[in-house]
Image: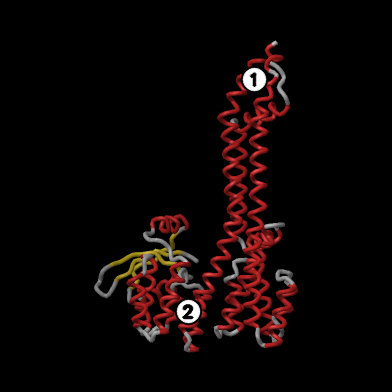
Amino acid sequence: MPTYKYQARNNLGKITDGIIQAESESAVTAALRQKRLEVVSISTQGQFGALLAALTKKGGNVTTKDIVVFSRQFSVMVNAGLPILQGLTIVAEQAENPDFRVVMTKVRDDISNGVPLSEAMAKHPKAFNTLYVNMIKAGEQGGILDVILERLSEYMEKAEGVARKVKSAMMYPIVVMSVAVLVVIFLMVKVVPTFRDVFTSFGAKLPWPTQLIIDTSAFLSSYKAFILLATLVGLGFGISLYRKTKTGAYNWDKMILMIPVFGVLARKASVAKFARTLGTLIKSGVPIMDALETVGKTSGNLVVERAVMNARDSVREGKTLTQPLKDSKVFPPMVTQMINVGEETGALDQMLSKIADFYESEVDVAVDGLTSIIEPILIVFLGVTIGFIVVAMFMPMFELGNIVG
């Protein structure tokens, strides 16, 4: 979404400026008019300016923890019969995160002007996503706002827990391998050259492991290493640009699901999120078409999103939800069979809840198993790599007598 820089005049005649994201300049004008500001000027801000504004922005972002705590507190207030406006005032005053305090103050001000709660929250997509807004809207229409808020907090806690476990499982080997590479580079660049000078002074032929380590050290200390590094950085930048395209993002998400070990874990996490989200929305009274659209947009994987949107088109045409999910090859047979049973019995939300519980436990087991397998593999890899370097450096010393002779 484009970023715009604006100058506007308030009702006192004072000029204020700021930065806003909107679809177009007309959308910026409309947003400023809602704030009772008269537009003076609007200009497009470049990517560098937007990045600089983001880096210099004061305050932290709204976190999932902020939303979960708010949902639980606000649910209790609504259930106790406290007026929504008064409840939001209390939440805004007690919020620890200054950014979230600002958001809740704006939501409270909108409600005091007669704006529904769901519409007021929809103005702050970085805090309240589409899923949250749709469920709040269903709670308003059904008169069960307190129940919806409780379900939202439970859903967000479980979804965040699954995401955190998957990230930790993937980050652990990345961190360890990064440290290992840095240690090896340090040995090659700082330690090995000292031995190389000593061995060269003898003028004898070195064992091949020693020669291999010395040649590698010489390569890393030369300009060729910088050329290789620049090539890798350029390749990474190119991949990053490709991922920003629609085709590239889809192919990247598809590749992730096909990775032998981590792909299985990512697929199970995606299935758990799909089932938990769709089940929560349907149980909360959100229409199936709106629910599927929300699930697709919040899936976090374009392959899953395409499968869900195809299923949405099938439901719109009066067909079942099961067949397009089965044809996508993304969802395991057990999932599609249980969804089929849920459609036939009218208990789709219950079936989806059972699927989510099962696959969330599967993610737990997979993460534990992956961690237990990766740890010894990494230890062996580090031991063999560093051990090879040490032995290669000491091999000529074992034959020092023959070399000197």
Q: Residue visible at 46% across and 68% down?
A: 126
344 relative position to 35: left or right: right
- Disc 2 on helix, strand or loop? helix
- Disc 1 on helix, strand or loop? helix
Q: Position of residue 256 (x, y in %)?
A: 67, 59
Q: Circle 1 sits on which residue?
A: 199
**Foreground: 283 or 130?**
283
Instruction: Say which amino acid is labelled 1.
Output: Phe
99 relative position to 357: left or right: left
Q: Circle 2 sits on which residue?
A: 149
**Mark nearer the N terminus (1 vs 2):** 2
Q: Is residue 378 above or below residue 274?
A: above
**Foreground: 256 or 74?**
74
Q: Position of residue 32 (x, y in %)?
A: 37, 73
Q: Position of residue 353 (x, y in %)?
A: 62, 77
Quadrant in the rendering for residue 166:
bottom right
| Number of residues whose C-alpha sits closer than 10 Å to that of mark 1, classed few (under 14), some (14–19) or many (20 or more) | many
Q: Can I make out residue 366 in this image?
A: yes
Disc 1 from disc 2: Cα separation: 72 Å
Q: Quadrant of the C terminus?
A: top right
Q: Residue visible at 41% across and 76% down?
A: 73
Instruction: Say which amino acid is labelled 2.
Output: Leu
**Foreground: 274 or 172?**
172
